[in-house]
Amino acid sequence: MQTVKAALARNEITMSLNTPLLPALTLLGNAALLQPPALAIFCSSQAPAGVLLHVHDLAQRWRHEERVIMSGFQSIVEQEALTVLLTGTAPVVVWLARSMVQQPPAPLRAALAAQRLLLVSPFPAGVRRQSTATAQTRNRLCAHHADVVLIAHAAPGGKVEALALELLAAGKHVYTLDHPANASLVTRGAEFLTD
């Protein structure tokens, strides 16, 4: 485990893309994975089954590509992506919404040993449980480190939708899946992800 200045990966990290945030990240694994290009994936906790299937299929394709895939991997759809990605060789960055774990979960250990996984925590040692606030901070930082963001699904009025709108307003490339439940994201500036 090592602590590095957030500026190692970017010159500036911000909470709302305007407000200065935490000064350091705690890393476990291959720190080089914070370098672009990277795709961040987010999904609301409640998502249509078609979105889950689409993300599963995308992860099947991504699992042998070189592009870094990053996320908090918290929602069911995000967890499905991680499960599939870990069966391949793709590099993965898992952003934690708490302090760094002392013992990584068993499914992550092989990828850590193969230097294709990085665990990142922007929180000090005393933050042992994730909360809504820490998850929001984690998601913003993760999105900031990615050059492309995929919002698999954002529930109307939810936190993932708010993040998507914030990223769009800041000029970030935001994509979503071609699903009827994502039409409102497209009308607000997101683009459908194409193969």
Image: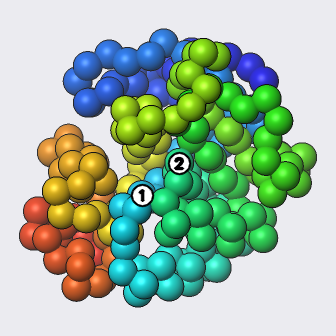
Q: Amino acid at mark 1?
A: Phe
* Residue 121: x %, y % from top left: 59, 29
Q: Is residue 32 visible?
A: no
Q: Amino acid at mark 2?
A: Gly
* Residue 14: x %, y % from top left: 34, 25
Who's the residue at 57% across and 41% down the image?
A: 95
Badge 1 local density, few (<14 within 10 Å), some, or many (20+)? many
Q: Find residue 90 and report its image quarter.
A: bottom right
Q: Which residue is mark 2?
A: 72
Reply above or below: 139 against 129. below
Q: Are marks 2 and 1 in contact (CB under 8 Å)?
A: yes
Q: Find residue 152 and report its image quarter.
A: bottom left
In the image, 126 versus 20, the foreground residue is 126
Q: Is residue 25 left or right of residue 55?
A: right
Q: Quadrant of the N terminus?
A: top right
Q: Is residue 2 visible?
A: yes
Residue most toward the left? 187
Q: Which residue is mark 1?
A: 42
Which dot marks residue 32?
none
The earlier-in-sequence mark between 2 and 1 is 1
Say which element carries label 1. Answer: strand
* Residue 166: x %, y % from top left: 20, 44
Who's the residue at 74% across and 64% down the image?
A: 86
**Number of marks in the rendered image:** 2
Who's the residue at 60% across and 54% down the image?
A: 68
* Residue 70: x %, y % from top left: 55, 51
Q: Quadrant of the C terminus?
A: bottom left
Badge 2 local density, few (<14 within 10 Å), some, or many (20+)? many
What whole-number distance in Å separates the C-alpha atoms at marks 2 and 1? 8 Å
Who's the residue at 62% across and 34% down the image?
A: 120
Say which element carries label 2. Answer: loop
Q: Find residue 103 and report its image quarter.
A: top right
